[in-house]
Image: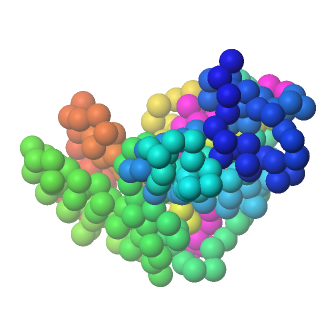
């Protein structure tokens, strides 16, 4: 069985001198039987590793045990390299979770915990985040914004810039410009909300249960501080999260006022993910993005 990289041995030896580790795929098993999740990236992955680590740190503070606990994240240096090619590569180490599918019962617990813990954890700096995070492979530059419309507009704008640079999406980008100019101020401007901590990519593939405890767990975040309802959008797009999650969530955290615009706000927040999937996977998702924008411009602005 292959040995563990010395960087991980150095980290764990701080608490357990003389520890030995063996590699089991992406997991490490220590001589005392504990398991850890470990990965090493290329030098170009530094920001992505840091974004995930900072997201997990913030979420663990907000809701301990709901996400894997981060143990360390950093850059391999002279002391921890095994070969010269390791220098400058990022590493990541967290507790290991044996994850199963999210059950309806666990989904209720997840809905309550996100509503009362994660989405109760507020920023003192405004909307945004202190480091870039990644929704899939897409970089969110983040930064801090005084208002939610400005923050969300910047998120959409980042995707539009990527589509413009790729070429072939001129019509989609022109329509997105109208949404940014007319829909975002109209729908989001009147909201009275606090910037709360979001997972950022809360679809069924990033949720589950810890098989050892049957408690819900979420992972692979792209966090920032924003409107709590933005965290609910992608889960409804692709299904897989039981309806009991949403019902329980809103029992503890009601829909923002005006409640009759909740569906339109969900369309707007889903638009972000349809545009992002167009960036990631190409034109198959562009039609869904256009349909969302058609509805938003018609319902919010009266555009036919």
Residue lying at 62% horizontally and 66% vertically, measured from the top left: 196
Residue lying at 57% horizontally and 32% vertically, measured from the top left: 204
Q: Does residue 52 lie above or below 278 as drawn?
A: below
- Can residue 243 be seen at all in this image of the molecule? no
Image quadrant assignment for residue 274: top left
Q: Is residue 209 magenta?
A: yes
Q: Is residue 148 magenta?
A: no
Residue lying at 90% horizontally and 32% vertically, measured from the top left: 32
Give the side of residue 199 with respect to residue 265, left or right. Answer: right
The stretch in magenta equals 190-212
Give the side of residue 217 with respect to residue 264, left or right. Answer: right
Position of residue 156 measured from the top left corner of the image (x, y, whole percent): 32, 59
In the foreground, 218 or 196:
218
Position of residue 137 measured from the top left corner of the image (x, y, whole percent): 39, 44
- Residue located farthest toward the top when viewing the structure as drawn: 1
Q: Image quadrant for the N terminus? A: top right
What number of labels is visible?
0
Image quadrant assignment for residue 195: bottom right
- Can residue 237 be seen at all in this image of the molecule? yes
Q: Does residue 246 lie above or below 251 as drawn?
A: above
Residue lying at 74% horizontally and 50% vertically, measured from the top left: 11
Query: What colouring does the structure picture have?
Result: rainbow
In the foreground, 149 or 168:
168
Position of residue 192 measured from the top left corner of the image (x, y, whole percent): 56, 75
Position of residue 12 measured from the top left corner of the image (x, y, whole percent): 79, 46
Give the side of residue 253 with respect to residue 257, left or right. Answer: right
């Amino acid at each position: 069985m292959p040995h563990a990289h010395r960087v991980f041995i150095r980290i764990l030896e701080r608490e357990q001198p003389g520890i030995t580790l063996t590699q089991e795929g992406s997991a490490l098993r220590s001589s005392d039987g504990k398991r850890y999740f470990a990965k090493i990236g290329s030098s170009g992955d530094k920001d992505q590793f840091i974004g995930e680590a900072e997201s997990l740190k913030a979420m663990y503070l907000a809701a301990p045990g709901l996400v894997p606990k981060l143990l360390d994240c950093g850059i391999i240096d002279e002391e921890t390299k095994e070969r010269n090619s390791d220098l400058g590569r990022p590493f990541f180490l967290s507790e290991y979770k044996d994850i199963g599918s999210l059950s309806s019962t666990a989904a209720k617990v997840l809905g309550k915990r996100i509503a009362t813990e994660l989405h109760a954890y507020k920023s003192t700096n405004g909307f945004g985040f202190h480091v870039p995070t990644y929704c899939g492979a897409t970089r969110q530059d983040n930064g801090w914004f005084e208002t939610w419309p400005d923050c969300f507009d910047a998120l959409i704008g980042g995707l539009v810039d990527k589509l413009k640079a790729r070429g072939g999406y001129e019509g989609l980008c022109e329509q997105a410009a109208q949404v940014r100019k007319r829909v975002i101020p109209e729908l989001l401007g009147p909201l009275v909300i606090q910037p709360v901590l979001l997972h950022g990519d809360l679809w069924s593939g990033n949720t589950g249960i810890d098989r050892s405890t049957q408690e819900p767990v979420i992972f692979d975040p792209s966090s920032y501080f924003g409107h709590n309802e933005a965290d609910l959008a992608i889960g409804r797009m692709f299904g897989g999260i039981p309806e009991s999650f949403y019902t329980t969530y809103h029992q503890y955290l009601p829909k923002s006022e005006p409640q009759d615009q909740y569906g339109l706000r969900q369309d707007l927040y889903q638009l972000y993910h349809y545009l992002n999937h167009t960036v990631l996977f190409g034109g198959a998702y562009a039609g869904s993005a256009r349909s969302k924008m058609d509805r938003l411009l018609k319902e919010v602005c009266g555009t036919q």
